[in-house]
Image (cartoon, rainbow, N blue to C red):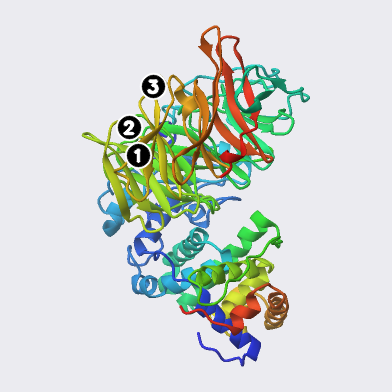
Amino acid sequence: MAGHTEELPVSGGPARGSAGGGEPDGFRGFVEARSSALLRSGWLLTGDWTSAEDLVQTALAAAWPRWESLDQSPEMYVRKIMVNTFLRWRERRWNGEIATAKLPELRAYGDVFAQVDSRAALTAALDRLPARQRAVVVLRYFADMTEAQTAQTMGCSVGAVKSHASKALARLREAPGLAELMTGGVAP
Amino acid sequence: MTIEDPFTFEERRLAEMLHRVTPEPPRGVTVEDIAIRLANAGAGSSRRGGRSRAASRSGGAPSRGPNDTAVIRGPGRPGRGRRWSPLLAAASVVIVIGASTGLAVALTSHNSPSSPTAGATGSPTSRPSSPGTQSTTTATAPTTTPATGPAVAPIRIANGPWDAELIDSDQLTPGTLVGSGNSLYAISAGYLLRIDAKSGVVKEEVQYSAPITGQPPVVDGSTIWVVWSFGGGTVELRGFDAQTLAQTGSVTVASSGSLASEPEGILAAGPDGTLYVAAGDSVAVVSPSSGTVLRRIDVTGGPAESLAITPDGSTLYVGTAGAVNFGLTSYNAATGAKLAANTQVADQPGNLVATSGGAFGTTGVSMGEAVWFFPASDLASAKEVAQAANGGSVAVPTLADGAVWVGGTRQLECLGAVSGVQENSGAISSVSGIPDQFGSVAYADGNAYAIFLNPHTQQAGVAKITPPNTCVG
């Protein structure tokens, strides 16, 4: 790239936007404490770890320069960026719902493969949901957000959250294998 | 967050199930990951669809042309991002993704001096056996050309293996045929082609001078990725729409240490589309959705010359050519942890193919290549599974339809993907003492295809083959 490269301006490094010119106070602790939970949410949103990691990195990178001036819970802010990024990706890449032609059959609980099957059944069920319904499911029922928090994160009304949640539950009810997952149990 | 809203019984069960079933991540995100990401953004990276906010804030105009490819290079300069200087050096990465061709191609010219080894073959000339519908242009954007002609009746190849019949008559670069859906993709002097598998018609073509001979394109869902340039401390990938071959993005990855001097297969895609790029002493893990380098897997034993990822995405194999030994090492693709290694490989392992049973790769150079199998259970107990006898690049192994295929000038073979044992073979004939060449087996539209060349008659192209059932993985 020698012919078309230039040194990054001094202001362009990662410290940009940070009052202290470096890592914001509390940022490392937050990342260490919450990255696992955020990644798990990302996995539920996207269905794979690479995209989950991309989502989390995108959100944390956006939060870094604003970290010390955030007027809301950092986690709420990070999750908001994750969800908005996810919704943009879905709009761009998939254009809506993905129909799953063949759903995995669940093995009997206790089978050594049951945990893998459970995850496959879960992601297949979530794949049935439109992006916003999926986001509501993750925020409400995995991230344990209230309806108001979910609405704030998604930039919509509480009524819209209720509607998305209701429709999502209806779709999930019809997802093969999910009812068993919700009533049965696989040892973690 | 606290739960203030009363859940219904069903909602409570759903919440409980989500917490119970959702797995723990294989690795966490670190502050260093974020720092590198920010460094990339500051270097002018942008998401598909536009420049990033970070880039905009840095004062760049919406369209800065080549200067958008700013790279953070070398050690950090005094007084700048003090504690992050080492990270900035490590993050010498530029990612440029453009939704529009205009944005993406404004950054690097096809024959740009920015690509020291790109365009080594010079300006593209008319593709052999294809009508000259491609206009030569000085524009930076590679141009695509639609279908080049009607289908022709398949031509039976005399004494060809497995009922081989020629369906296309382009002279293709050995080792570059891949299949996806109903299409075959291959590289032919100066062009990347999309061939309709059923008819053999070249549906689309785009100018592309491969910087690494024999490096196949990589299909990632709806995108075809190729190595656009390789050298000068960077590896540039470009993505093309799998149907139209319109450019959709580019990714430039900086090398850590020197790039491989003899690259043989430096790009691979995992099952989820994640791209793995051999970039010197590390393998860059690139998210195709954002074009961002997510992390790097450090490679031991010298520059990474070749790599392959298992179909389940769990294990990365890397072939290296160090100062003392050639080696093949396996890594946990999620964590980067080294799993096993064979540091006593007789020659540089290249053109790697990974299966759940291990890795297949070539050793030897040019026309004397042999194919080896390195069992995952014991990489050190590698065994030669095919001698390609003057097959050159056409003999490189491929993984298609669950089997490993090796071509050459003597026989076309299918090997058990897990066992490495030959399942079947078809003899390749000679004309006047000059053997035909078959290889680069790929699957598309439910059928098998191979690159064919008859050096005697110069007849060449894509041959449809019908392997025996024992070859099906």
Look at the numbered disc 1 and give the secondary structure of its residue: strand
Q: Nearer the viewer, mark 2 or mark 3?
A: 3
List x then y, in percent, for residue A151.
63, 79
List x then y, in percent, for residue A68.
40, 73
List x then y, in percent, for residue B408.
49, 24
Q: Are marks 1 and 2 in contact (CB under 8 Å)?
A: yes
Give how far apart the Cα atoms at labels 3 and 1 are.
18 Å
Using the image, determine if residue A140 lies above or below residue B220. below
**Residue for point 66% across, 65% down:** A103
Give how far apart the Cα atoms at labels 1 and 2 are.
7 Å
Residue A178 in sight in this render? yes
Residue matched to label 3:
B368
Badges 3 and 1, same chain? yes
List x then y, in percent, for residue B396.
46, 30
Using the image, determine if residue A43 lies above or below residue B236. below
Q: Nearer the viewer, residue A85 or B431?
A: B431
Look at the numbered disc 3 and give the secondary structure of its residue: helix
Q: Are marks 2 and 3 in contact (CB under 8 Å)?
A: no
Badges 2 and 3, same chain? yes
Residue matched to label 2:
B348
Amino acid at pointer 2:
Gln
Badges 1 and 2, same chain? yes
Amino acid at pointer 3:
Gly
| Mark identifier at residue B319 | 1
